[in-house]
Image (cartoon, rainbow, N blue to C red):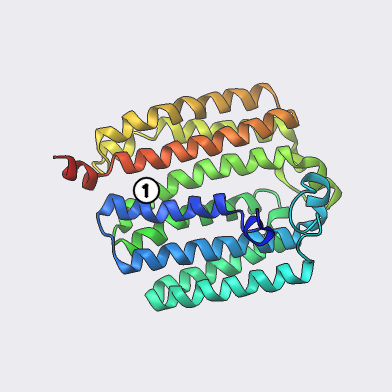
């Protein structure tokens, strides 16, 4: 893969794009604003991934030496220029859509840079920041698709599960984080407390997931499609409580990501708009 595409972490950025498309599917509104919002999300999140790699090049040299910067495929200064350019492009497009979306893109970009520079090294604060940004994607898409209330509910669930995964990832990256002087939750309070909090968040997210059905936001097909994710999240909660080794935290992190993908598909499957098309 081309280094300039790889450093964007396109799979992660595409997950954010899927969120926007999900809100369009749920609302049934496929407009130019939605299309432009997709472009904004991919560009800004890609820029956030680049700036994160810029500030994390020392940690990545230990944890993930194959990434574009530590491997020497992209120079450090070039990565900084690349990231800033992408941020600017995304913010300009967002302001073209509307003032509120431009403000959200601008503030989100600032938070991403702040996160990469220092917040991620602070106990819980870094996890909260990235989880908030993930949930905010739903709201951003909700504004574009004129489905704001629903986007807030779904954004909250995304926040909880992302928070759980971020904690698990911190457990996985403890060695490199210690070398860089980071003060993450596992470093500050131990893997036991970290695993319990991650498991608690996964369980709360799972058992409360039917609420969006009972509120009439999504249809019964959501519950059916979400069932595999429910089982996976519960398994991950049990697994992380049982084993906090680097190998298992890496495996649990991947499984949570798969579960989140399944949950996204479930959101789409439960869309009242899709049900109306079937009928």
Label 1 sits on residue: 153
Confirm whether residue 94 shows in the render: yes
Report crowding for label 1: few under 14, some 14 to 19, many 20 or more residues within 10 A (C-alpha).
some
Q: Position of residue 192 (x, y in %)?
A: 71, 30
Determine the secondary structure under disc 1: helix
Q: Is residue 118 above or below residue 60?
A: below
Q: In terms of image quadrants, where is residue 206?
A: top left
Question: What residue is drawn where x is 38% and y is 74%?
Answer: 97
Q: Nearer the viewer, residue 16 or 7?
A: 7
Question: What residue is drawn where x is 38% and y is 59%?
Answer: 141
The quarter of the rendered structure image containing the C terminus is: top left
Q: Nearer the viewer, residue 251 or 112?
A: 251
Q: Position of residue 27 (x, y in %)?
A: 26, 54
Q: Residue furthest right?
A: 179
Q: Is residue 128 above or below residue 257?
A: below
Q: Is residue 106 left or right of residue 52?
A: left
Q: Nearer the viewer, residue 76 or 199?
A: 76
Q: Is residue 158 left or right of residue 69?
A: left
Confirm whether residue 197 shows in the render: no
Question: What residue is drawn where x is 28% and y is 60%?
Answer: 30
Q: Position of residue 1 (x, y in %)?
A: 65, 53
How many discs appear?
Answer: 1
Q: Nearer the viewer, residue 31 or 236?
A: 31
Q: Position of residue 29 (x, y in %)?
A: 26, 59
Q: Is residue 173 left or right of residue 278?
A: right
Q: Residue furthest front?
A: 1
Question: What residue is drawn where x is 82% and y is 51%?
Answer: 61
């Amino acid at each position: 893969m081309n280094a300039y595409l790889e450093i964007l972490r396109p799979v992660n950025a595409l997950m954010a794009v899927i969120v926007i498309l999900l809100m369009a599917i749920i609302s049934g509104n496929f407009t130019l604003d939605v299309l432009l919002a997709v472009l904004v999300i991919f560009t800004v999140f890609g820029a956030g991934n680049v700036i994160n790699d810029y500030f994390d090049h020392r940690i990545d040299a230990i944890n993930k030496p194959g990434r574009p910067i530590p491997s020497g495929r992209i120079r450090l200064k070039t990565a900084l220029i690349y990231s800033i350019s992408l941020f600017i492009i995304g913010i300009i497009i967002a302001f073209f859509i509307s003032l509120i979306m431009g403000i959200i893109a601008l503030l989100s970009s600032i938070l991403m840079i702040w996160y990469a520079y220092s917040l991620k090294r602070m106990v819980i604060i870094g996890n909260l920041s990235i989880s908030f940004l993930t949930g905010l994607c739903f709201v951003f898409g909700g504004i574009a698709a004129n489905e704001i209330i629903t986007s807030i509910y779904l954004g909250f669930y995304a926040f909880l599960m992302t928070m759980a995964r971020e904690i698990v990832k911190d457990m996985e990256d403890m060695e490199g984080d210690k070398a860089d002087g980071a003060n993450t939750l596992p470093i500050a309070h131990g893997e036991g407390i970290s695993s319990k909090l991650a498991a608690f968040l996964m369980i709360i997210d799972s058992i409360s997931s039917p609420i969006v059905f009972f509120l009439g936001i999504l249809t019964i097909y959501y519950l059916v499609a979400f069932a595999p994710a429910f089982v996976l999240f519960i398994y991950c909660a049990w697994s992380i409580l049982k084993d906090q080794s680097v190998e298992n935290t890496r495996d649990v992190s991947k499984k949570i990501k798969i579960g989140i993908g399944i949950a996204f598909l479930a959101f789409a499957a439960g869309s009242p708009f899709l049900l109306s098309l079937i009928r």
